[in-house]
Image: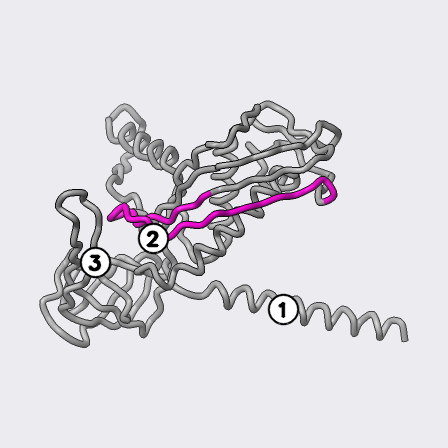
Amino acid sequence: MRKQLLVLFVAVFLGMLFVIQGTSIAEQKGMRYSITVAKFENRSNWSGRWNLGDAWGAVLTDSLNQAGRFIVLGEKDMRREAMQEQDFAASGRAAGGGKKVATGQMTPAQLLVKGNITHFEDGTAGGGGGIGFKGFRIGAGGGAAEINVIMYIVDSTTGQVMASKKCYGKVSKKHLSLGLTKGGFSGDIGGFKKTNAGKAIEMAVDEGVAFMISQLEDIPWTGAVVLTKEGKVYVNRGEREGVEVGQTFCVGKAEVLRDPDTGEVLDQSLDKVGTVKVVKVKEKISICKIIKGSGIKKGMTVLLPD
């Protein structure tokens, strides 16, 4: 009898777990936006032996990756290093083995997330179970951590702030987990998240990421025509961005109206010339057929229909 009850309990538990996971996957469906994380400025009065802005950026990047709605590009310093490496490889000073260096293929970000850390407190006391951070030890003994951050979502093309959010996280010592792995934040984000400081940052990050996802319906998802050939239109968005066979896109010339005095974006519109339907999808591109209109050319903007 006990064995039967145990089997029934496990079955019910696994069923609930499947429903929860199914819901999570369902919530992740939708078009994905390319995004890059800019360095967050630490404008709080806190300073320590580890960089608060770097910690926030790493946790935010990790959470965006796991959200399922974003293609997370490297931070500015990562992309700068990648371009420097490309330049070095193309200089003729590196052993290429006959391989041609590919440049000009960095994925552009549709969105940029940046902001300011306005308040931070870390009362974590030293003790056993601490983790390393860039050669230092962050104690795991006790105390509380608190953080306030203002986050901005920016259109990388126009520089316009699309939305903003004040994020908050606070964790006391009773939420602190022990048994931390070695390596610390610099080598183990999971370990850093087990400290009070890491948990508070993750709480505020999760609030910010949830807000960003809630704003995506109001942020235009765009692509571009990269080739027209034999009646087919090739768009620079594919499986990676969530494009599916059967979807339709509006195609046209994007017009941005700016204030001549300040350069501020006043309005954006699309001078529509046609509509296309996706017939084949690859990782980074989708191949479409024209179902309405004419005059579609390389470089034109692609939008989801209203």
Specify whether 129 is left or right of 262: right
Q: Is residue 149 above or below residue 240?
A: above
Provide the secondary structure element on which disc 1 rests: helix
Q: Between marks 1 and 3, how big is the CA–CA gap?
A: 43 Å
Residue under numbered circle 1: 18
Callout 1: few (<14), some (14-19), or many (20+) C-alpha neighbours within 10 Å? few
Residue depicted at 39% across the width and 35% down the height? 78
Upstream in the sequence, badge 2 or badge 1? 1
Q: Nearer the viewer, mark 1 or mark 3?
A: 3
Q: Which mark is residue 162?
A: 2
Give x and y (percent) for residue 165.
45, 50
Specify whether 123 is left or right of 226: right
Magenta span dominant secondary structure: strand
Q: Amino acid at mark 1?
A: Phe
Provide the secondary structure element on which disc 2 rests: strand
Q: Between marks 2 and 1, how big is the CA–CA gap?
A: 36 Å
- Label 1 near label 2: C-beta < 8 Å? no
Q: Amino acid at mark 2?
A: Met
Residue depicted at 56% across the width and 42% down the height? 201
- Label 3 near label 1: C-beta < 8 Å? no
Q: Amino acid at mark 3?
A: Gln
Q: Residue furthest right?
A: 1
Looking at the rendering, which quadrant does residue 219 occupy? bottom left
Residue closer to the observer: 53 or 74:
53
Q: Is residue 99 magenta?
A: no
Upstream in the sequence, badge 2 or badge 3? 2
Residue under numbered circle 3: 268
